[in-house]
Image (tube, helix red, strand yellow):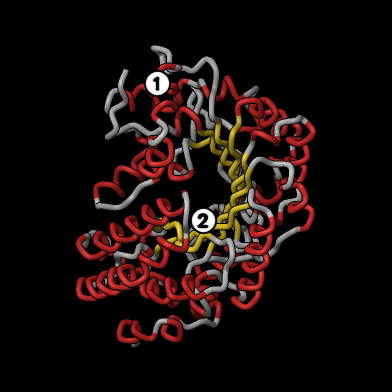
């Protein structure tokens, strides 16, 4: 059977993802659609017998068959909606990564039984969101991912499930023997593990997971990937990394200087720069470690993308992959980069595209070898996002919410959006 590339995504064949409470999801973009069993109950990693039975649940089988038959699974609405507006989705990113390996795609399709099941998992990619313990309160985040955000939301009168987020913090499901056994059952098939949080570098159980993988003799065929705020870099973790095939660290950076601190409150840019250069040196000394920049394109930083590219170009990095990987903020809706009035959106798009044209030769030449093509892909994604911001007016309806939410956050945190983004002053006159 040939996959329908308009609906096909390789992730349901290779990907297992856990939300911050341990519940299963198809991928990080399907966070609002937890996987369920035949009785309609949400399934959890820590309550699952083994990776084989979990990966062949009725819902997984149904999703695979839907994709192969050209249908759009409900779990994937975020990607298809983003694509319909000209954006670059997680599904497309997965196709770009695995679609170049036709042998892998063909192998996945051939391994699929008529009922959608898979007898022997291959190329498994585990995505683990280990709770909601974090030391930052980023504006685009949620108490599900950072418990301390809940304190601010409560003061601002924002609705959220306080008991549920507190339970996630205290439960520490990722420390249970059943969770470790579930991960252990997957290790023979695993090629990559992505760890997020919360802040993964603050979660001590993460070190235990790495030690278990090493002790079980699987570290040599497993690559590690992280999304981190890189406010802390534990020495213990760096030592454990030496046993793994490859380590990729995605450092979350939204902008440079005070705007980054404004968004990723209460981070301190001076310390973050020091940590970035420390990671850069670590990667320079250890070729199997890769340091990348990950940026959420949103209403705040979209106004400063040219300055951000300037900083990335001028930084004295020896190993950091300079061009940022971009993820469009779709939730909360008021932070979508397309919330501005048409004239401002057109101005934003023009400035970004002008900056990209200016910097493109440098980034293509600096990121040599296999990274050159990655740079080219990321540059095109930024171009696509820019055109989407210019032409798609569907998010303008959230502009008043953006003003209201920004004022509420500023008042509580004693910050000022017009200090970091003075061009927004006309919209914030009382």
Give the label on residue 160, or none: 2
Q: Is residue 237 above or below residue 213?
A: below
Q: In front: mark 1 or mark 2?
A: 1
Q: Secondary structure at mark 1?
A: helix
Q: Nearer the viewer, residue 126 or 288?
A: 288
Q: Nearer the viewer, residue 5 or 317?
A: 317
Q: Is residue 9 above or below residue 107?
A: below
Q: Residues within 10 Å of mark 1 (few under 14, many from 20)?
A: some
Q: Position of residue 354 (x, y in %)?
A: 28, 72
Quadrant assignment for the N terminus: top left
The residue pinned by badge 1 equals 109
Task: Residue 192: name its quadrant.
Answer: top right
Q: Secondary structure at mark 2?
A: loop
Horizontal placement of 425 versus 141: left or right?
left
Q: Position of residue 407 (x, y in %)?
A: 43, 77
Q: Residue at x 38, y 35 (%)?
A: 99
Q: Residues within 10 Å of mark 2 (few under 14, many from 20)?
A: some
Residue 194 visible? The answer is yes
Give the label on residue 178, or none: none
Q: Is residue 307 above or below residue 429?
A: above
Disc with the residue nearer the chain's start (1 vs 2): 1
Q: Position of residue 271 (x, y in %)?
A: 65, 74
Q: Position of residue 122 (x, y in %)?
A: 54, 25
Q: Residue at x 57, y 73 (%)?
A: 316
Q: Nearer the viewer, residue 215 or 104?
A: 104
Horizontal placement of 27 versus 85: left or right?
right
């Amino acid at each position: 059977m040939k996959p329908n590339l308009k609906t096909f995504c390789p992730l349901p064949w290779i990907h297992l993802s856990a939300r911050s409470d341990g519940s299963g999801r198809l991928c990080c973009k399907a966070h609002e659609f937890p996987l369920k069993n035949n009785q309609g109950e949400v399934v959890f990693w820590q309550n699952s017998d083994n990776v084989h039975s979990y990966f062949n649940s009725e819902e997984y089988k149904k999703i695979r068959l839907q994709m192969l038959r050209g249908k759009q699974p409900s779990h994937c609405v975020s990607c298809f909606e983003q694509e319909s507006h000209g954006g670059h989705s997680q599904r497309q990113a997965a196709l770009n990564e695995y679609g170049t390996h036709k042998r892998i795609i063909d192998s996945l399709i051939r391994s699929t039984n008529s009922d959608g099941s898979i007898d022997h998992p291959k190329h498994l990619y585990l995505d683990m969101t280990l709770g909601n313990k974090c030391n930052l309160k980023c504006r685009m985040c949620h108490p599900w991912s950072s418990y301390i955000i809940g304190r601010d939301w409560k003061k601002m009168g924002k609705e959220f499930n306080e008991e549920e987020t507190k339970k996630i913090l205290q439960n520490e499901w990722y420390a249970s023997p059943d969770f470790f056994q579930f991960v252990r059952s997957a290790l023979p098939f695993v090629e990559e593990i992505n760890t997020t949080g919360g802040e993964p570098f603050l979660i001590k159980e993460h070190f235990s997971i790495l030690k278990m993988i090493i002790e079980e003799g699987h570290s040599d065929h497993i690559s590690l990937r992280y999304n981190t705020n890189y406010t802390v870099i534990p020495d213990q973790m760096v030592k454990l990394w030496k046993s793994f095939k490859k380590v990729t660290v995605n450092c979350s950076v939204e902008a440079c200087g005070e705007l980054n601190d404004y968004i990723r409150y209460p981070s301190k840019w001076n310390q973050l720069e020091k940590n970035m250069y420390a990671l850069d040196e670590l990667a320079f000394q250890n070729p199997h470690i890769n340091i990348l920049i990950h940026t959420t394109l949103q209403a705040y930083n979209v106004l400063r993308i040219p300055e951000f590219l300037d900083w990335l170009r001028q930084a004295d990095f020896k190993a950091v992959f300079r061009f940022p990987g971009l993820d469009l903020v779709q939730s909360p809706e008021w932070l979508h980069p397309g919330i501005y009035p048409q004239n401002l959106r057109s101005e934003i798009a023009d400035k970004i595209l002008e900056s990209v044209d200016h910097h493109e030769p440098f980034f293509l030449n600096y990121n040599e070898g296999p990274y050159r093509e990655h740079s080219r892909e990321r540059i095109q994604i930024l171009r696509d996002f820019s055109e989407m911001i210019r032409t798609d007016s569907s998010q303008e309806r959230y502009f008043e919410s953006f003003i209201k939410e920004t004022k509420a956050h500023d008042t509580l945190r004693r910050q000022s959006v017009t200090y970091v983004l003075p061009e927004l002053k006309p919209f914030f006159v009382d």
